[in-house]
């Protein structure tokens, strides 16, 4: 059965103490809930990872980073490798977030390299895709997402794809308060699953968790997650408040 996931992306927010405290309260909230392992994931800044790893104890909350280097190790000042992330106890890494694509010019080829190396180090990858506003207005959104998927992911084997979670995040909806309608989300998620089916066959496509991201909040999560191809969410702003984040997670 396809796994449902709600992942928080803290971005560059919260100091160490605030982050540990938020992780502790999220972990405590889910302690006695009947959840599968890592149905809730916290993607924290790098420096929070080891500390958060020690306070998420019940196995229901998983831990991830928001980025990783495209090289395994060496003279790359300021970079953090996938192996380093793994050594903190984290099991996930976000690759290809639109903020990395636009502010740090991370393009498809590099993202494919990051994905490949993260998988080789034993991490699961939350791979983000999504179009900007102009691309949607020009009705190029399907082509854009197809290109991002093909260039970023389609060099992987079917077996490697089992370690991928896809997050569709229309860039125009991220942090803007504008949310894709449930029908817009479903339309793209269905399209993505269709691409996976053509490339990898039914079983990879049906098993793939496809998250929606972009101004997801408690008030719209239920409707978004009720769509058949929306398997949860990647949550930015609303993941910084325990009440909002757990309310979104409760939506499925
Ligand atoms: P948002 O961010 O929920 O604040 O829109 C989502 C994301 O960037 O992952």
Image (cartoon, grey):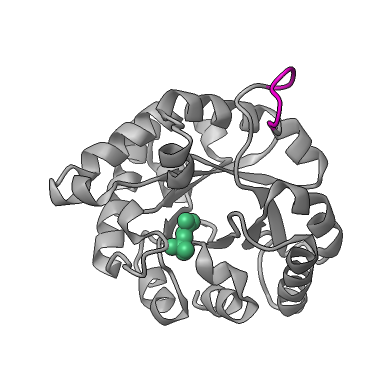
- State left or right for residue 250 relative to residue 170: right
Seen from the viewer's position, the closer of residues 252 and 25 is: 25
In the image, residue 57 above or below residue 118: below
- State left or right for residue 196 relative to residue 5: left
Q: Is residue 77 magenta?
A: yes
Residue at 29 percent of width and 46 percent of height: 131
Residue at 47 percent of width and 79 percent of height: 218
**Which quadrant of the figure has residue 198?**
top left
**Which quadrant of the figure has residue 14?**
bottom right
Residue at 81 percent of width and 44 percent of height: 88
Boundaries of the magenta span:
72-79
Q: Main secondary structure of the magenta part?
A: loop
Residue 97 visible in this rendered orientation of the protein? no
Seen from the viewer's position, the closer of residues 37 and 178 is: 178
Residue 73 visible in this rendered orientation of the protein? yes
- Furthest toward the top, the residue is 75
- State left or right for residue 17 relative to residue 138: right
Residue 41, image x, y percentages: 64, 59
């Amino acid at each position: 059965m396809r796994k449902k996931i709600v992942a928080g992306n803290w971005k560059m927010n919260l100091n160490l103490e605030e982050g540990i405290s938020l992780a502790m309260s999220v972990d405590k909230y889910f302690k006695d809930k009947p959840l599968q392992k890592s149905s809730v994931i916290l993607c924290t800044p790098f420096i929070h990872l080891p500390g958060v790893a020690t306070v998420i104890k019940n196995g229901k909350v998983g831990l991830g980073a928001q980025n990783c280097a495209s090289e395994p190790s060496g003279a790359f000042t300021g970079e953090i490798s996938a192996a380093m992330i793994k050594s903190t106890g984290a099991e996930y890494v976000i690759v290809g977030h639109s903020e990395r694509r636009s502010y740090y010019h991370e393009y498809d080829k590099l993202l494919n390299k990051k994905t490949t190396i993260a998988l080789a180090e034993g991490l699961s990858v939350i791979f983000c895709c999504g179009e900007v506003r102009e691309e949607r207005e020009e009705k190029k959104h399907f082509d854009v997402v197809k290109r991002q998927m093909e260039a970023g992911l389609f060099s992987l084997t079917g077996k490697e794809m089992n370690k991928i979670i896809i997050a569709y995040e229309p860039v125009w909806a991220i942090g803007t308060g504008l949310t894709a309608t449930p029908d817009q989300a479903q339309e793209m998620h269905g399209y993505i699953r269709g691409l996976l089916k053509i490339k990898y066959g039914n079983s990879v496509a049906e098993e793939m968790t496809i998250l929606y991201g972009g101004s997801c909040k408690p008030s719209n999560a239920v409707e978004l997650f009720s769509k058949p191809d929306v398997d949860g969410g990647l949550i930015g702003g609303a993941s910084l408040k325990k009440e909002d984040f757990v309310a979104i997670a409760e939506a499925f």
